[in-house]
Image: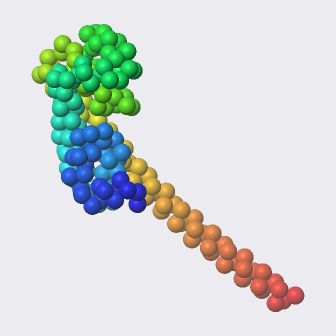
Amino acid sequence: MTEIESFVATYGYLAVFAGTLLEGETVLVAAGLAAHQGLLDLHYVILVAIVGGTLGDQLAFLLGRWKGEALISRFALLSERKQQVHALLERYDALLILSIRFIYGLRIAGPVVLGTSRIPIVRFALFNSIGAVIWAILIAGAGYSFGAAIHTLLDHVQAAEEILLALLVVVVLGVWWWRTKR
């Protein structure tokens, strides 16, 4: 069991909430795995992830509104890309808000940069919530499916081991019989 799996198994839904409030994917995949193992309920994992993911991005967006310019100026790459993000936001605001949580490395920085734009808070909150629902279902579902795939694979491995053990026993008995008859 990895440290993250242990964290999720120990703290349950609180771990899911804390993990999804921040970056979240790894914790959410582990929670999906835990749900497959019967340690957590998948529906509650998704619900908690939706709340944590929505709240985390909404707080990052509000941080962007409050101190975004000062924060972004500390990171050269973000400063360089801010105008591009704002231009994309003017053309594709809904799509950008929905997808920002799926872009690696932008889960926290993305909403901060979006918070420096002129997009209304309510519009961001709406699409942020929809994006969190899609994200939670997909990522927790991936963890759950991975658990199912591992379970199926292990069942096949166990069956193969049993066949190989039977073949080994037959070969050993055959060699023993051949040697005793010779």
Identity of the residue furthest to the bottom in this view: 180
Q: Nearer the viewer, residue 115 or 146?
A: 115
Answer above or below: position of 105 versus 45.
above
Determine the residue positioned at 48% across, 62% down. Answer: 155
* Residue 53 percent location from the top left of the image: 23, 37
Which residue, as the protein is rendered here, is positioned at the far left? 122
Q: Residue at x 24, y 58 (%)?
A: 11
Could you tell me which quadrant the C terminus lies in? Answer: bottom right
| Residue 91 horizontal side relative to residue 147, left or right | left
> Quadrant location of residue 107?
top left
Q: Quadrant of the N terminus?
A: bottom left
Residue extending furthest right? 182
The answer to which quarter of the image holds residue 65 is top left
Residue 46: tell me if it is visible: no
Q: Residue at x 44, y 52 (%)?
A: 149
**Relative vertical location of residue 177 with respect to residue 134 in this rendering, above or below:** below
Q: Nearer the viewer, residue 25 or 141?
A: 25
Tally the marks.
0
Query: Measuring 14% from the left and 17% from the top, which residue is drawn there?
Result: 120
Q: Is residue 179 left or right of residue 108?
A: right
- State whether residue 33 is above or below residue 21: below
- Residues 82 and 147: in front is 82
Indicate the quadrant where residue 163 lies.
bottom right
Q: Is residue 151 visible?
A: yes
Residue 3 at x, y percent in the picture:
38, 56
- Type of colouring: rainbow
The spot of residue 38 in percent (x, y) is 29, 60
Is 87 drawn above or below residue 149 in the view shown? above
